[in-house]
Structures are given as structure tokens and as C-alpha cells.
Image (spheres, helix red, strand yellow):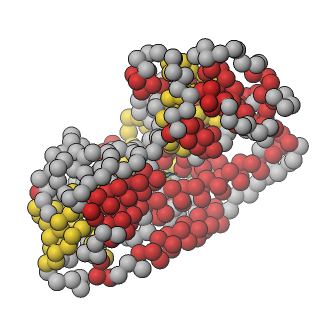
């Protein structure tokens, strides 16, 4: 039951108390106190409850198991690793709850008259109805309702055996086996982690995609490498998914063209995310919608058309990443607060990381976007990590980095990587992209020895040579030579 009167008037209503909504709420409050934050689900944010943080906790357990099992190459033998599934999941839940607790503490600090619980929907361009709550006349509105797993109909056959990331981190033990549908970011991260924790995993994709990878060379090495650990068919022919007494049966065509049926304890649907727009009755908002039903908006102001409605985070279906949701919440909330004055906000250089092993990273423009932007006048520099000094030292010498630069200007355009420490290399590259550095400027930066970043230098030197920006670079083998 709501403590609010049946109808209230506010300057700003923020729908959704996730990462984008919370930031938007606090930004709007810098301009007016007449702000309300509406949340229809549990507080705590997707990131902390069922997203970024618990997935990384599971991955950390998997990494510990994998390192121990593969220590033999260093002459250290710990092959008989025992994985206590209950303890693994207990730590995941405990640490997850801790992260969620921080969010709940900050929500607690919001005055109760500014928090409304219930699902909101539009009843007019500036009017909202909250389920079991008040009607709200809001001069300005921020839509920050996030996204959810898009479970394709075909997978519904798994019945009670169908799980999504919303379920996995509440498990009290590890299952015996999981069929993962969707080798995107979420499927790859959770699937590989489960596999390394001793769960039998098979991964099914469509269209050949693996994570966010767009560069065909990177895609090839990623597919081959993951397949050394667990079967991943990025373009699978699955014919049936059926719940049985024992689990879920998946029928598919294997690599030799044979029809196979394999039973799994669970089927994890990681088949993309869909923006939470369907419950918002956007037809009453007066906004122009795109073909997915998402309001059209300006990515620099987050304003929808010329309305006083703004849209931030996963719901706008542009960049479903935590730091982007926070940035967008900041821009949308500030604009809603100061409306009718609307300002553009800073958008950062694109960066994304997938926490598999090897990690996947993408920075700046994709190879296809680089081709388009440079009208074909670009070059690619690369490094294979097999013989990269530091990577070999730590036994993580697998993967490829490809960097793209423009002919003529020598400007760094973007990069894709599948390899060791990609989360760190990606940051160096993103900072360079945002500073609009050219390849020579990047090569003037310091590189310590022996570090994985020397591999980045090799790729940049290769790019430098391909772009003919000056005298040829020294041989690649100097990468691991002393004092180069
Ligand atoms: C498994 C997983 C792993 C991830 N890992 C990473 C990572 O490593 N790095 C990274 O950058 N990103 C990662 N992400 C993505 C990141 O979590 C999201 O981009 C981010 O959480 C989106 O925040 P948001 O505020 O848009 O949405 P949310 O945090 O989902 O908030 C939306 C809120 O709106 C509420 N809501 C919905 N509809 C209504 C309504 N009608 N009325 C009222 N309230 C409503 C929901 O209940 C929810 O609380 C991951 C996501 C997942 C699922």
C-alpha cells in the first residue's frame, strides 16, 4: 500500500532505480527537490544483483580452479583440485549481497517521500500511473528501466529447466551440466566459468558470432580457443529443446553432421537483452518510437525528440554497459533537472571488455566502422601473443591484438583483442582514442619491461610500418629483448 496521496505533482520523475536511474535522480536533485524515483522491482541494481559483479565473482572462482589445475607447466602439481560447489556459490552470494548492500544503503538515504515502489506506465506525455501507487503529473521524466534477457520462444521448451542470469547467482550449488544458448558476453562469461568449475557445458550460437567480436581474424582465434575448453558451435543447428524428468534434452547437429541429443541439468538462455519498454505504455507518451518500440533520442542530450522526456541506460538499447548507463544517467538527470535548458554531455571513447580467459576487448571503431570512416584508406597492425615475452612467462601466451589506423593522418581508429590482460590494454587504447592520438604519439609513450603492454607496442609498430609513417620499426623479437 502506498503512503502517497492518489495524485502528486513533481518537477522530475525518474522511472527505474538501477545504475542509470539512481545517478539521474541525484543529478536532477541538484536542481530541484521535487523529484521522485520510481522502482517496480527489487532495489539493488542489475549490475550488483544479477550482472557485472556476481558474474565476476563466479569467474574468479573459476580462475582459481583453472590456475591450480594448470600449474603443472611451472612444475607445480595441484592437478587433483576439489571444487566445493556449495562453497563456491556461497561466496558468490555472500559477496554479491555485500555489493547489493552498498546500493541499498544509498537508497535508504533517499527520503521516503521521494521513493515510490511499483511499476510505472505512461498515461499521457507528462503523466504516469504507478501500480498500487499514485498518479504522477511530472513536468519532466527520465526513463531508466533497463533491460532483461530476451528468451527466444524456441527455448521455452526447456520449461522449469530454463534459467537466465537472474537465477544463476542464487544457486546454492553448482549443477552437473548446462547448455548455454547465446555465446554473447553473458553466455561466454558464465559458460566458461561454469566449465572451469567442473560443470559440463555446451554452447550454442546463431550466425557465427562470439561475444562482441567484429574482426574476422579475432573471431577465428577466439572460436578455436574456446573450443579447446568446451564445445562451442557459434552457428548451431538445434532442432529441439525439451524438458524431461531428468533435465532438458537438446537435439542438434554436431560438427560431423550427425543428429545428437544431449541431456543437461539446465538450459541457460543468454540470447541477448531486450529493453524494458513494453510495460511503459509508451503509446500514451506522444514519443516517436523506433522499430523495437524504443523512443527516438539524441545520444548527447538523451532527450527524446523535442519533449521533456529523457532516456538513459540499457533501456535506450544503445550501449548496454555499466559506465555508459551511469554517464547517460548523469546527462539525462541533469537535463531533466535544469529543463528547459538542455545541454549536451560528454560521451567517452567506446570501450568494452569480456571477462573470459583470454579476455576479449574492443575499443573505438570496429574494423567495419574504420573501413567506412576512412573510406577504405586504413591499415591494420597486429601482434600474436604466442611468443610475447611477458605472456609466455606467465603462461598466458594465447591470443591476438589488431589495431586500426588511418592512412595519411596516422590516427588510431580502434582495436579488437582476444588475449591476456585485455582489460588493461583496452584502457590504454581507449585513452589514446579519446585523446585522438596518432600512432607515432602512442609509440612515444613509455613501455616498461617485461610487460604484456610490450605486445601492444609490437602491434603499434606494425601499424606504423603498414601506414608508412617513418623508418621501419625494429624486429618483433626485440619485444622480449632487454632494454628495447
Ligand atoms: C550477467 C551480466 C553481466 C554484466 N557484466 C557487465 C560488465 O562486466 N561490465 C559492464 O559494463 N556491464 C555489464 N553488464 C551490463 C550492466 O549491468 C548494465 O548495462 C547496467 O546494469 C544497466 O543499468 P540500468 O540502470 O540501465 O538498468 P537496471 O540496473 O536494470 O535498472 C533498471 C531498473 O528499472 C526497473 N524498472 C523496469 N521497468 C520499470 C517500470 N515500468 N517502473 C518502475 N521500475 C521499472 C527495474 O526493476 C530495474 O531496477 C552486465 C549485465 C549482465 C546481465
Point 71% across, 54% down: residue:
64
Q: Can residue 269 be seen by looking at this rendering?
A: no
User: Residue 163 is drawn in which quadrant?
Assistant: bottom left
Is 151 left or right of 392, judged from the image as shown? left
Residue name at image x 89 percent, y 43 percent? 75
Please determine whether, in this image, residue 28 is positioned above or below residue 473: below
> Residue 285, position in %: x, y?
14, 56
Vertical placement of 108 versus 142: above or below? below
Q: Please state, as top left, top right, bottom left or bottom right, where the C terminus lies in the image.
A: top right
The number of callouts visible is 0
Question: Which quarter of the rendered picture does the N terminus lie within?
Answer: bottom left
Q: Quadrant of residue 480?
A: top right
Can see residue 450?
Answer: yes
- Using the image as rendered, state which of residue 127 and residue 90 is in the foreground: 127
Residue at x 80%, y 49% (from the top left corner): 79
Q: Can you say whether 39 is above or below 145 in the image?
A: below
Q: Is residue 150 left or right of residue 441?
A: left
Where residue 129 appears, x then y in whole percent?
Answer: 16, 69
The residue drawn where x is 17% and y is 50% is 306
Q: Taking 62 as reference, is 21 above or below it?
A: below
Q: Residue furthest right?
A: 75
Which of 367/358 is in front? 367
Instruction: Decide if residue 404 is on the left or right side of residue 149.
Output: right
- Tell me which image quadrant ligand 1 sits in: bottom left
Which of the 4 quarters of the picture holds residue 117? bottom left
Q: Where in the figure is residue 223, as x and y percent of width and height?
A: 56, 31
Name the residue furthest bottom: 3
Q: Position of residue 477 (x, y in %)?
A: 79, 22
Amino acid at each position: 500500500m502506498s503512503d502517497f496521496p492518489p495524485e502528486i505533482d513533481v518537477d522530475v520523475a525518474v522511472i527505474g532505480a538501477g545504475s542509470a536511474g539512481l545517478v539521474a535522480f541525484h543529478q536532477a536533485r541538484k536542481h530541484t527537490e521535487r523529484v521522485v524515483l520510481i522502482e517496480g522491482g527489487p532495489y539493488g541494481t542489475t549490475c550488483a544483483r544479477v550482472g557485472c559483479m556476481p558474474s565476476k565473482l563466479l569467474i574468479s572462482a573459476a580462475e582459481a580452479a583453472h590456475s591450480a589445475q594448470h600449474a603443472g607447466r611451472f612444475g607445480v602439481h595441484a592437478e587433483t583440485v576439489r571444487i566445493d560447489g556449495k562453497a563456491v556459490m556461497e561466496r558468490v552470494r555472500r559477496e554479491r549481497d555485500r555489493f547489493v548492500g552498498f546500493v541499498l544503503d544509498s537508497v535508504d538515504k533517499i527520503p521516503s517521500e521521494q521513493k515510490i515502489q511499483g511499476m510505472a506506465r505512461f498515461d499521457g506525455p507528462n503523466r504516469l500511473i504507478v501500480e498500487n501507487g499514485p498518479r504522477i503529473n511530472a513536468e519532466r521524466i527520465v526513463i531508466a528501466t533497463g533491460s532483461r534477457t530476451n528468451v527466444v520462444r524456441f527455448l521455452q521448451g526447456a520449461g522449469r529447466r530454463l534459467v537466465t542470469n537472474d537465477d544463476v547467482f542464487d544457486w546454492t550449488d553448482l549443477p552437473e551440466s548446462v547448455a548455454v544458448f547465446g555465446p554473447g558476453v553473458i553466455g561466454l562469461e558464465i559458460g566458461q566459468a561454469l566449465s572451469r568449475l567442473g560443470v559440463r557445458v555446451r554452447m550454442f550460437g546463431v550466425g557465427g558470432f562470439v561475444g562482441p567480436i567484429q574482426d574476422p581474424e579475432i573471431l577465428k582465434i577466439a572460436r578455436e580457443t574456446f573450443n579447446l575448453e568446451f564445445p562451442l558451435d557459434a552457428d548451431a543447428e538445434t532442432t529441439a529443446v525439451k524438458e524431461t524428468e531428468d533435465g532438458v534434452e537438446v537435439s542438434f547437429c554436431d560438427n560431423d553432421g550427425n543428429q545428437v541429443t544431449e541431456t543437461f541439468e539446465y538450459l541457460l538462455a543468454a540470447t541477448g537483452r531486450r529493453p524494458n519498454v513494453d510495460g511503459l505504455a509508451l503509446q500514451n507518451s506522444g514519443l516517436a518510437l523506433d522499430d523495437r518500440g524504443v523512443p527516438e533520442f539524441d545520444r548527447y542530450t538523451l532527450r527524446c525528440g523535442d519533449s521533456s522526456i529523457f532516456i538513459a541506460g540499457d533501456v535506450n538499447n544503445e550501449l548496454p554497459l555499466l559506465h555508459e548507463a551511469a554517464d547517460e544517467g548523469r546527462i539525462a538527470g541533469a537535463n531533466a533537472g535544469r529543463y528547459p535548458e538542455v545541454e549536451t554531455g560528454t560521451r567517452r571513447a567506446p570501450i568494452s571488455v569480456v571477462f573470459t580467459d583470454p579476455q576479449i576487448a574492443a575499443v573505438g571503431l570496429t574494423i567495419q566502422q574504420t573501413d567506412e570512416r576512412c573510406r577504405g584508406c586504413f591499415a591494420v597492425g597486429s601482434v600474436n601473443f604466442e611468443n610475447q615475452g611477458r605472456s609466455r612467462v606467465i603462461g598466458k601466451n594465447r591470443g591476438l591484438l589488431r589495431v586500426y589506423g588511418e592512412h595519411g593522418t596516422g590516427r588510431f581508429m580502434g582495436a579488437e583483442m582476444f588475449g591476456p590482460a585485455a582489460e588493461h590494454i583496452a584502457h590504454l587504447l581507449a585513452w589514446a582514442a579519446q585523446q585522438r592520438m596518432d600512432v607515432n604519439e602512442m609509440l612515444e609513450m613509455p613501455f616498461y619491461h617485461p610487460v604484456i603492454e610490450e605486445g601492444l607496442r609490437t602491434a603499434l609498430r606494425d601499424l606504423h610500418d603498414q601506414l608508412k609513417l617513418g623508418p621501419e620499426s625494429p624486429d618483433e623479437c626485440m619485444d622480449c629483448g632487454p632494454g628495447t
